[in-house]
Image (cartoon, rainbow, N blue to C red):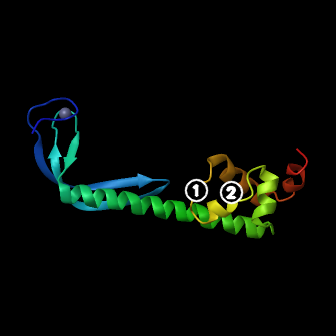
Amino acid sequence: MKCPACGHPEMVSKTQDETLSYGGQSLTLHAMRGEFCPVCDEGVWDSESYRRYTEAQAALLRAVKGDVSGEIRRIRKNLKLTQAQLAEAFGVGKVAFSRYERGETRPPAPVVKLLKLLERHPDLLKEMNTV
Ligand SMILES: [Zn+2]
């Protein structure tokens, strides 16, 4: 088969491990089969390996998302705030934190960073309500 990326006429069948990384976590799939381009390294998985790849990708995404939701809840409880109080302090919609904690919406990175900052400096919360 022809390489879809560079057009090289001969792709080589190979079996190899493939490591997926996302949000600081990684997952290795063994014995992944596909055709690989010897020129540009482009690879095309066979259908079984492709299915395993997309499943692993989804699982990794869920794992990372779950971690963020759990962390938001944990920090909020440490700050002794309700979801509505936190939303007001952050100036976001009332249901935003409920969605983050249930993993429905991935929280924007600045929200997560600000929360981690507040965890270390809870006194800043007072100031947040006045800006
Ligand atoms: Zn190629």
Given the image, on which type of amino acid does mark 1 rest?
A: Thr
Quadrant in the picture for residue 66: bottom right
Q: Which residue is mark 2?
A: 96
Quadrant in the picture for residue 11: top left
Given the image, on which type of amino acid does mark 2 rest?
A: Ala
Q: Which residue is mark 1?
A: 105
Q: Is residue 79 visible to us here?
A: yes
Q: Is residue 80 above or below residue 68?
A: below
- Measuring from the top left, give residue 65's x and y in whole percent: 53, 60
Are dots 2 and 1 in contact, CB under 8 Å? yes
Q: Secondary structure at mark 2?
A: helix
Q: Residues within 10 Å of mark 1 (few under 14, many from 20)?
A: some
Q: Which residue occupies 23% across, 39% down?
A: 42
Tell me how far mark 2 sits from mark 1, CA to CA.
8 Å
Quadrant in the picture for residue 57: bottom left
- Measuring from the top left, give residue 129's x and y in whole percent: 88, 51
Q: Dividing the image into four equal quarters, which quarter contains ligand 1?
A: top left
* Of residues 1 and 119, the one drawn nearer to the viewer in this rendering: 1
Q: Earlier in the sequence, mark 2 or mark 1?
A: 2
* Of residues 110 and 38, the one drawn nearer to the viewer in this rendering: 110
- Measuring from the top left, give residue 75's x and y in whole percent: 71, 65
Q: Is residue 96 left or right of residue 20?
A: right
* Of residues 103 and 122, the one drawn nearer to the viewer in this rendering: 103
Q: Which residue occupies 56% across, 60% down?
A: 104
Q: Is residue 32 visible to us here?
A: no
Q: Which quadrant is the N terminus positioned in?
A: top left
- Measuring from the top left, give residue 15's x and y in whole percent: 16, 55
Q: Is mark 1 within 8 Å of ligand 1?
A: no
- How many numbered discs, if any? 2
